[in-house]
Amino acid sequence: MSDVCIVGIGIHPFGRTDGLSGLDQGVFAVRQALADAGVEWPQVQFAYGASDAAGNPDTMVDRLGLTGVQFINVRNGCAAGGSALFSGQMAIKSGEFDLGIAVGFDKHPRGAFNALPSEYNLPDWYGEVGQMVTTQFFAAKIMRYMQMFGISQQTLGRVAEKAFRNAVHAPHAWRRQPVSLEEILEAPLVSDPYTKYMFCSPAEGGVALVLASEKKARELGKPLIRLKAATMRTRPPHSFEVFAPSIDVVEDDSAPRGTASRIASADAFRLAGIGPGDIEVAQLQDTEAGAEIMHMAENGFCADGEQEQWLAEGRTEIGGALPVNTDGGCLACGEPIGASGLRQVYENVVQLRGDGGGRQVQGRGSSHGSSGPKTAYSHVYGAPGVSAVTILER
């Protein structure tokens, strides 16, 4: 079975764009990706589209062309974009198609996400007591993790400081001004221990990726950015997840619990035939600063508790041992749900092509001016405990 390749990428800048709908931004990203791939819309054989709050993606055919293309909508929480990509690569691997698109976009209202208990098969009282307020849940979750594994609030601040510093060099990012560690830590608390700079904001944006079989990619004359693994998994027993109805009591709670991220990550490494030590750049879900911390361990890059030293030593900086969230992640880009997971993959393609500019990661063992890393990893997490992982190679 041949590899699936990413031959075209497109993005509409994240943030707030008055006068443009979420669909407008998705169409913008598709047209940019098609141009990047050197193909036309009538050549596209299928599309998978993700959106949570901005309408059905398949309606963009009115703008792109009524070619009768197979277009399937995907809705899977914050993992919607990653799920669209997973579905697209399976379509090509099946042998039925040679060329397709994964697209995601969204345009969320200002303010916090307004999820309803009924959407997750939860009783109304779950929302009435405040459990649907994600800032509260994630604060409680990281408080537990900090106590168990010795993570300080300063380390949370360092994650946010790095995000805003990286985003200065990412044209598609929303918040592109550096913020000092002192300002981050002294900012108003939203939910203890998180200050306002430690949470991402709902946002707008669109991303599209053109996928091709290896044979088709060679015909197009495109550099081979191979999708070596794409996995999507749901939560296992005993996990502690947003919008899950409860957390199980276990006899020994001192060890890390199983999570969807751990399963998806392990399966992705198995499919790619490599391990965490082989990854040269990673984009990890960071809807809040603590998510990046926890996901470093859940994806196998370090042990629980080692993040304190990693951040203090700068190992996740652009020039560190494992650069993480090189475009600023969700903290700096915001989180338009349908597009967010695909933004991570977009950023990894930019890095593998060597087009990152001031945020470009140098490949291991390479000198200044190299074409970038050879492996890239992305991870997205969504409610109520779903995760998608991709591994790219060039």
Image: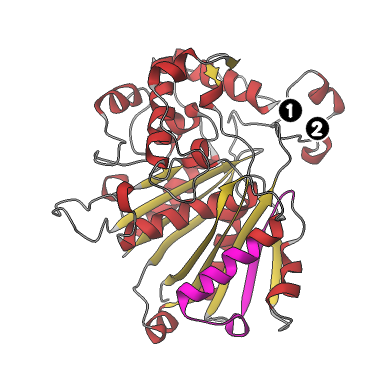
Residue 312 falls in image quadrant: top left
Above or below, 124 relative to 121: above
Q: Which residues are magenta?
A: 26-53
The secondary structure type at the circle numbered 2 is loop
Residue 3 at what x, y percent from top left?
Answer: 41, 72
What amino acid is labelled 1 in the image? Met
Q: CA distance from mark 2 to mark 1?
A: 10 Å
Q: Which residue is mark 2?
A: 122
- Looking at the image, residue 271 sits to the left or right of residue 98; the answer is left
Q: Earlier in the sequence, mark 2 or mark 1?
A: 2
Residue 283 at what x, y percent from top left?
Answer: 42, 45
Picture colour scheme: secondary structure
The secondary structure type at the circle numbered 1 is loop
Assess whether residue 87 is covered by the magenta stretch.
Answer: no
- Choose mark 2 or mark 1, whichever is in front: 1
Q: Residue at x 27, y 34 (%)?
A: 315
Q: Residue at x 46, y 26 (%)?
A: 256
